[in-house]
Amino acid sequence: MSDRELIRITLRASAGAEAAARELSDRHRGAAAAYAAQCTTTATAAALLLTSAELTAAQTYLVDGGSTAWRPYLLNTLVRTAAEWAAGDEQRHLAPGLSSWLAESDGAVAAPVRRDDTTGSVLLVQAFQQLPERLQVVLWHRLVDQEDIEQVTQCIGTSQDSVRTWADTVEDKFLTLYGRLYEETAAAQCRPFSRLVLTTARIGFPRTLGNGNGNGGAAGLKGHLAMCGNCRLVFRNLSWLHGHEWGPLLAESLLPWGGGDYCAGRAAARAGEPPAGARAAGAALASPLRPRALRIRSGRALLSAAAAAVVGVVVGVLFLLPGDSDQAPRDPAATLKDSHDSVHQWSGSTNSPKEKAPSPSVSPSASASSEPSSSTSPDDSPSFSKNPPAPGSGKRAGARLRWDFQNAGERPVDTSAAGRQGSYHGRVEWSNDRKGSVWFNGESYVETSRAVVDTTRSFTVSAWARLTSSGEFYTVAAQDGDAISGFFLQYAQDDNRWRLAMGQSDSAEAGEDEAESAGPPAMDTWQHLTGVFDAEKRQIRLYVDGRLQSTAAHRSTWSANGSFSVGRGLWKGDKSDLYKGYVDDVRAYQRAMSASEIAALASAGPNG
């Protein structure tokens, strides 16, 4: 099981909670204990700090951790816990260097990174955060802790072959993300040099170069770097990443304090050197970064009394803390009442029990039925209004399409007010499961004759899906452009994840922005998928079973004004990614639905 799955089990009052807590602790004990020792003055203090941090991290990770890998989140929690100690009598147990750093920073250990903060240091953190969680795990464990493939595989809960593949490509993906963030956020005076910064940091300056006073080329860049501290820092970071070991730079950027010492200490421990040697090596390996806290997602922890008691197993496994047995558990009702309805939780699988649906029964004679004419529905095309309802007006737009598949027939019935019709293509079979659903065989699909949503504006698309194969890419819902779909709500075979992807232009050669699920799909099990494009925030979001999985920036909008389809996508102008499995209750909205609305939609169940 992955780290995230173990944490979920640990928080449940179930028979496997204790074993899950022990397994999670064992995986990360060496790294976390080393950092705790670095933060404290005695072994006893280190043990108590680690115990407290593990308990806190387990309670907050699924809410505050976003899609962050567990180990850097746990290590950040160690320093946040130390900051709490610094305000009380426990301060005397902290390492002098950490005490001084906390005093200088006024205890601001985990302040969120501001959206308008685009310095080179912050961009490193943001690039790491934008990687899928599995790639964060590979990057940290392989390059900072230098663990073997088997150890990394355990933390992700996948195959060793997949980890080897990701390990071969993760550095290039990280560099691409960092470079793209730098170019997107560069100030006006820096943009003429941004491409030169990326290129020259990789290949280095020519041996013969002028005094840097030129206006163009490498000489002009050298003059710009002399005046611009941010571009200079980006250049130094990229030069380091192209020419040095990554571990020290990543540790310094993602840990609040002492990242270089931590990285060197881990290397020394693997080599069998004493801790003192590791501390000395840490100074030599220090990267060009100032220490920076890893941003965490804002929100409050949701923890019931029963779950809190189970999390206490972590304490029992590690160390016995005096006085804990007399502490009354927090009332679960009060805990839930305090929580925001917009708190983000993360899940890769459904919460409902697996349903065994009956085999497809009735075929609606849907083989390649003809396209409906434009006269069949006066509202078959979306009205792309430039003046949507104003925020706060109280008007919430209804669905622009809803196919609930409750009745067999030659066409799906749109039960929304728009009444948009569609046509089945290929062998689409209807089942009476869940009040009606359809089955696609990998060669069939259903589509409208015209667009349903304007992909340049905010929209939401949701569907219930029961995937029966993992052999290829499978698209649940999409809308055609000329060359590719404007969005893909789909299963991604290479990552074994649900995925919402939007291309940066109408071309298969252009990049894609994607938000992926935190875990693999629950095969042959119904799951509720929701993809959101928020035009105001320039962001895409993916939800599974009503829970936010991940987000991604999407700034390059374009209009995909072709057919809305269920069961296929469009790639290089051809029908592609044809779906295998069941689909039910497909909906599309011309707005970005809120987290609470999506949670309610998933909770209502199919055709609710």
Image (cartoon, helix red, strand yellow):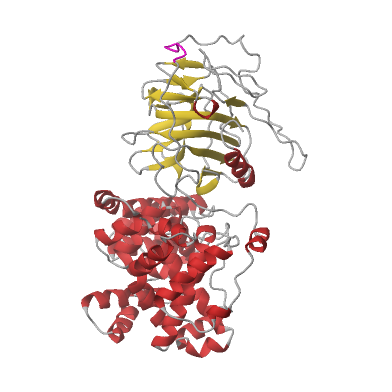
Residue visible at 57% across and 62% down? 303
Residue 279: percent from left, percent from top:
33, 83
Tell which of 535 and 372 is nearer to you: 372
Q: Is residue 290 visible?
A: no
Quarter of the picture holding the N terminus: bottom left
Quarter of the picture holding the C terminus: top right
Question: In the shown orientation, is residue 218 left or right of residue 370?
Answer: left
Question: In the shown orientation, is residue 248 left or right of residue 408?
Answer: left
Q: Main secondary structure of the magenta part?
A: loop
Residue 336: percent from left, percent from top:
64, 59
Residue 364 inside the magenta-drawn segment: yes
Rendered position, 383 above or below 391: above
Residue 379: percent from left, percent from top:
65, 18
Magenta-tinted stretch? 363-368
Q: Is residue 77 visible?
A: yes
Residue 89: percent from left, percent from top:
56, 89
Rendered position, 410 above or below 575: above
Rendered position, 480 above or below 182: above
Question: In the shown orientation, is residue 64 left or right of residue 269?
Answer: right
Q: Which residue is the extreme one toward the right?
A: 393
Residue 327 inside the magenta-drawn segment: no
* Residue 375 picture quarter: top right
